[in-house]
Amino acid sequence: MSAVAPEFSRLIPLSRVEPRPLRREIAATESERAALARRFDLVALDRLEAAVELVRRADEEIVLHAAFAADFVQSCIVTLDPVGGTLSASFVLRYGAPEAEAAETDPQEDWVYEPLVGEAIDIGEAVAQEFSLALPPFPRGPEAGLDAASEPPGDGGPFAVLSSPGEPEQR
C-alpha cells in the first residue's frame, strides 16, 4: 500500500539543515490550494503562504519556526452560505529522534514535538496541518442569528422550566 503524497509538499533534506537558520518562503499553487480546500472541507482557499525557518540545535534535534497567512471561504454552519475568512498565525515545531519525546523539555517552551523520521522535513505539510488547526471550527455568517431554542433561558438556569407551575404534560 503506498502513502498518498501531501497536497502542499515542500521537502527540505535534513542534510541541508545546519545551526545557521535555513529560511524558505513558500506559497501554495492554485492546484495545491484546490486540493487543500477539499481536504479541509473549505469552499475555497484563495491564499496560503508562509515564511519558514529551520535550525539544527543538536545532532538529533531540529526546530521549525513558521508564520503563515491564508484567505479562505467556509460554509456557515447555520445557513450554509459562504463565509470568508483571513488568518495569520505562527508556530514552532521541534523535530527529534522518536525516543527524545519522552525526554524532559523546558516548561517555558511552548513547542510541539514531532518525531524525526526519514531524511527530510516537509515544511509545506507542517504549514498545512497548522493552518487546519487554526481554522474556525464553527463558521457563522453575519446573518446567522441564534434561534430561540439555542438561546439560554432567562432567570433560573436551564432547568427553570421544570420547576415552573403549570399543567403536567399529557402522554
Image: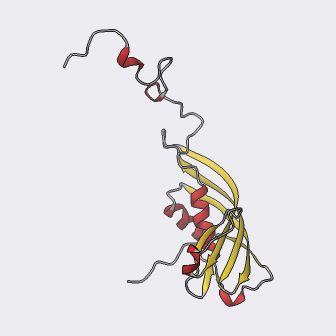
Can you tell which quarter of the image residue 162 is in?
A: top left
Residue 166, horizontal then vertical, whole percent: 32, 9
Residue 161, horizontal then vertical, whole percent: 38, 18
Q: In this view, does 166 lie above or below 101?
A: above
Q: Is residue 48 above or below residue 72?
A: below
Colour theme: secondary structure
Q: Which residue is drawn at 66% across and 87% down?
A: 14
Residue, far right = 20
Q: Looking at the rendering, in which quadrant would you find the N terminus?
A: bottom left
Q: Residue at x 63, y 73 (%)?
A: 124
Total marks in image: 0
Residue, far front = 104
Residue, far bottom = 15
Q: Residue at x 56, y 86 (%)?
A: 118
Q: Residue at x 57, y 39 (%)?
A: 141
Q: Who is closer to the viewer here, 149 or 141?
A: 149
Is residue 78 found left or right of 166 in the rendered image?
Answer: right
Residue 67, horizontal then vertical, whole percent: 72, 64
Q: Looking at the rendering, in which quadrant would you find the C terminus?
A: top left
Residue 66, horizontal then vertical, whole percent: 71, 68
Can you tell which quarter of the image residue 168 is in?
A: top left
